[in-house]
Image (tube, coloured by chain):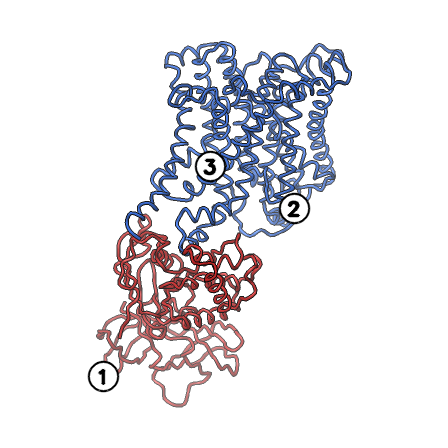
Amino acid sequence: MNLKERIFKINSIYLIIFILGVILVLFVVLPVLKVFVYPSLEDYGTILSRARSIRAIKNSLFITMMSTLTATIFGFLYAYTLEYSDIPWKRTFRFVPVLPLLSPPFVVALAWILLFGRRGLITYELFKLNWSIYGWKGLWLVQSIAFFPYSYLIIDSVLKEIDPALEFAAKNAGADGFHVFKTITLPLALPGILNSAILVAIYVLADFGNPIVIAGNWPVLPTEIYGRISGHYDLTGATGLSAVLLIPTFLLFIINRKILGSKSFVTVTGKGSGLEKPLVGKVTRWILFFLCFFIVSIIILVYGILFIGSFTRTWGVDWTFSVQHWNILFGTKISSLYNSIRYGLFAGGGAALFSVLASYFIYGKSFLGKKILDFLVILPAAIPGIFLGVGFLLAFNRPPLLLTGTSFIIVLGLMVWNIPLGYQSCTANLTQIGNEIEEGAINLGANPLRVFKDIIFPLLHLPFFSGFIMGFLRSITNLSIVIFLISPGKSTATAEILSLIQYAELGPAIAICIALFSIALLVIFLTQLFLGKEVNLFSQRGI
Amino acid sequence: MKDLHIKIRDLNKKYGDTDAVKDFNLEVERGNFTTLLGPSGCGKTTTLRIIAGFVKEDSGEIFINDQLINDLPAHKRKVGMVFQSYALFPHMNVFNNLAYGLYLKKLPRKEIEERVKNILRFIGLEGKEEQMISQLSGGQQQRVALGRTIILEPEVLLMDEPLSNLDAKLRISVRNEIKQIQKKLNITTIYVTHDQEEALSMSDTVVVMEAGRIQQIGTPREIYNSPRNKFVADFIGMKNFLEVFIERMEKEKILVKANQNKLLMNRVEGADLSSGEKILISIRPEDIKIHKNKPEKSVFNLWKGIIWQNSYLGKIIRYWIQTPDGQEIIVEDYAPKEFLEGEVYLEIDEDNIQYIQKE
């Protein structure tokens, strides 16, 4: 082999790393920087002296604390019940909390409005009350239900990892059930609980769909940012507040990385004992069962009421059966649904491909600047959707990167937003595969590109597919990013839902929600059918 | 005539401040089975990985057939490696695992099939070509790993603790298989292990390493019979280390004193000793005769002692014995007639006293 050939071979790796790096700089770093430098220092002063801005900041922090607390408590109790009791209907209980993750972000809020709104089934119809749920209390309730599934999934996986032998050892030493819980289970699960709380807090801070529907005139940062742009064309105000929003999110993100970095002690003992978990006592069992039953009922009620709502002529006024909302969906709104699916396919596929490439060529190789690139791949997880939307809006609105008004910008925004999730499952898998298989292939004469094609990619096909499918699902249900990037003819289903809600056209909005949700269910069903249990779409490990 | 195949000169590798490999020099003749032996972290695996090209050395030169291979990328080195985990491709069947390297060489399909067939016969896995790796037993996987490497007819075979994933019984039979294959192919092999028995039984040459440095190079017999320092002696399982003073140098013998007891031992060739010096010696437990009563014939190296612990191991009994001057001696009785207790006499043959090093 001559020198020229060798330089080419070595360079082909660096070329890929370089391309990945350029993509990250252009579509992660640039939008973030653009947002930060858009307002001048003076502008920041003006923005922060505005009473409404202060209110939005305070409200955001307040609701984040409240909703995170309740969602985490629900999540913990729910996971604990499923792992430590033998209640009936466990399969249903495991499945139902996944539903909100498959839905556009405002389904719970919409259902709440149908039930407790000004013309709500319960408030108006049943009790003739003039009371409505709009405001922070409604938002709190809605977010607690909408975000507890994340908490449940993370804590559940942590509880699963606790070796029951430890709990039995404590019992053996004389501890009663409550003591075991207090001194063994809870402390061992604590890092996981913290991890889930931080993750939920990041989601709540970034939540746009629920507050825009239900918070009414109670501003939080995402809705205020949106209002600045859509109501006042005030990009300066929007970017300033976006920058403010990124600070707590980013801090939480860093803290979380530190917690995960320092590792929990759950797995210290090495070999699992293969024991069954000790079960809670009879009374506790029933209390926990009814708690879970209550939560599950609410979620089922949410979807049930939406389903009924989509076939009701005018909610709260005319209760007769009607398919007019569905006619609207299949008439003028169907193109937005197609758009959503198209964007979802490209964004999901792109994110999955990028994740696999990045996991091997960035995470799996060592080179100067590796840590920075690795950080940039994960960074979008810390960026609220609304921030990313504003950033893309600013960064690509003039040549040479004029993407505003194209479908491409929407796909790119969604893709970037989905990369961290796929990247994490790819790197976790890569670590499991270990170095030796890769070295084995090299030793047999494969160059690094061959290794990727023949060995790494085939071995990572499961995280690739789950990354693709999760990316697709998250993309078709995303609102906060696409809301700033759509243009006439390029609208998405979620954006259509929002505009219908704003025109008080709840019926067609609900019909589109149900349609999106059905697509998501269908995708999950097909995935399970073709890939079987191998693909665990909802194994949450946190960011 | 010496037919040098691998030459490693002044190899160095640091991880942070730690020397993983320090001033490593080794020459391996064609067809030789050389084992790098040492505890974990001694640098043996790092050395192997440097030769394979997975780790870049800080300095030093590696020659194979007088060709410098330092700057050759790993996939061009023609050194076959068998990994500790086997590193078989789980998504390919046995045939494709064996054929992978041949595919990369873009050999014609027919030749690939022919060679895989031959190798399958060679490793005794005929008829298994369609099976996935996960369907094979540990021993079979190990053979595929070896077959996948030798099918490419590499210049040199590297093996990184290839037996550590097998259970103890299987280990011995696979050990013999590997040795036979190596002899049959007459392929120059560098083998890494921490198991001294494995090293002594398989190798032509043993390289004992510690903390990145070579402690001793020699044939298994040399290593076992004349370990050069305490580390090597300890590592290959020697016991009863005694610090003694040389009291008198005689023509053929040396008189030494361990605490109060005196010992007569043979003169050591190549060691420049003089009276008054402190040296370390060792006596193998099986080389000490244990007597219930004082032997009738006169024996110079006869020590008195008291048994304070014993351990019954089936065909042998191991005794822990304390001499009146406080030395602790382990003795193994390979033909036990009875359990001994209390006071005993130890007879130490002067031929069996092993000089280790100066203190």
Q: State how far apart marks 2 and 1 are (Cα).
A: 76 Å
The colour chain A appears in is: blue
Q: Secondary structure at mark 1?
A: loop
Answer above or below: position of A525 versus B350: above
Q: Chain of mark 2?
A: A
Image quarter of the C terminus of chain B:
bottom left
Q: Are marks 3 and 1 on the same chain?
A: no
Q: State how far apart marks 3 and 1 are (Cα).
A: 79 Å
Q: Which residue is mark 2?
A: A277
Answer above or below: position of A361 versus A385: below
Q: Chain of mark 1?
A: B
Q: Residue shown at 64%/12% (left/top)?
A: A504
Q: Of marks 2 and 3, which one's residue comes earlier in the chain? A: 2
Answer above or below: position of A238 versus A15: above
Disc 1 residue crowd, few under 14, some 14–19, many 20+, Cα 10 Å: few
Image quarter of the N terminus of chain B:
bottom left
Q: Secondary structure at mark 3?
A: helix
Nearer the viewer's eye, disc 2 or disc 1? 2
Q: Are marks 2 and 3 on the same chain?
A: yes
Is residue A289 toward the left or the right of residue B74 in the image?
right
Disc 2 residue type (three-letter)? Lys
Q: Which residue is mark 1?
A: B251
What is the quadrant of residue B248 in the picture? Answer: bottom left
Disc 3 residue type (three-letter)? Phe
Nearer the viewer's eye, disc 3 or disc 1? 3
